[in-house]
Image (cartoon, rainbow, N blue to C red):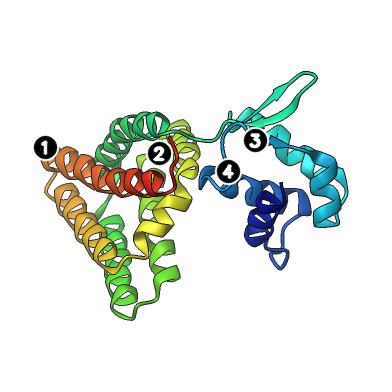
Amino acid sequence: MANTIDAVKKNLDLTENKPLKFLVYEALKKTIILGDIPAGERINEKEFSEALNISRTPIRYALQKLTEEQLVEYIPKIGNIVKGISIKDAYEIFDIRKSLDTLATIKAMELMNEQDFADLKALLEKGDALNQADQVDDVLQNFSDFNDFIYEKSQMKRLREIVVKLRDYLLYFRDISIRSSDRRSLALDEHWIIYRGMLNKDIHQITLITHEHLDHSLNFILTEMEKRKIG
């Protein structure tokens, strides 16, 4: 249990301007998804409360949220047991994302005007500049901004909500992958190809590169999960 608590402490950033219950939830979620709390381990509210020097209320909130997301399971008379995320889950998430991201991109392409395309191009140019300056955190934000731009312009609110929720499951692995300079550069190139496909109204190209882009991300995530012995 001590190692588990230490892992959560590393991911608990109390300097962020958010309610404590959200910070605890995010720290626990990240620690579980990255496999630093192995599947099958029990999370004891009392022990966490004492070790983190906080009340049990934010821990209880975090566990309720993680149970809703199926990362934790409450078993009567036993307690809160970590389920985590599996390689099978990763495949499923990316299969769904391929379909939804392709749909969102095509829909955005159909609805975007000349100024929208200019704004998207400027966003990509900014990403290239940030990458050349090796501003990794800003590149990560630029990638999120690119995806959010597509979802917004698709005007498909429900699709956006579904995709963002799915993306959040593996966001921590994505951040690890993008910290590799080769992966950052490749992802930026893929974003440019998606942009050109949208500009040319080329649905075939959009579909191919969106699937290829997500396959590259998935392959890195699977490699990372295997390194961490996450099944």
Q: CA distance from mark 4 to mark 2?
A: 33 Å
Instruction: Give the structural element (helix, strand or loop) at label 1.
Output: helix
- Amino acid type of the residue that numbered disc 1 sits on in the rendered structure: His
Q: Callout 4 environment at 10 Å: few (<14), some (14 to 19), or many (20+)?
A: many
Counting residues from the start of the chain, the first of labels 1 and 2 encountered is 2
- The residue beneath circle 1 is 204
- Quarter of the image for the C terminus: give it: top left
Q: CA distance from mark 3 to mark 4?
A: 10 Å
> Which is more toward the observer, 50 or 118?
50
Q: CA distance from mark 1 to mark 2?
A: 21 Å
- Image marks 4 and 2: residues in contact by CB distance under 8 Å: no
Residue 83, position in %: x, y?
A: 57, 31
Counting residues from the start of the chain, the first of labels 1 and 4 encountered is 4
- Amino acid type of the residue that numbered disc 2 sits on in the rendered structure: Gln
Residue 73, position in %: x, y?
A: 65, 26
Counting residues from the start of the chain, the first of labels 1 and 3 encountered is 3
Q: Callout 1 environment at 10 Å: few (<14), some (14 to 19), or many (20+)?
A: few
Instruction: Give the structural element (helix, strand or loop) at label 2.
Output: loop
Q: Callout 2 environment at 10 Å: few (<14), some (14 to 19), or many (20+)?
A: some
- The residue beneath circle 4 is 32
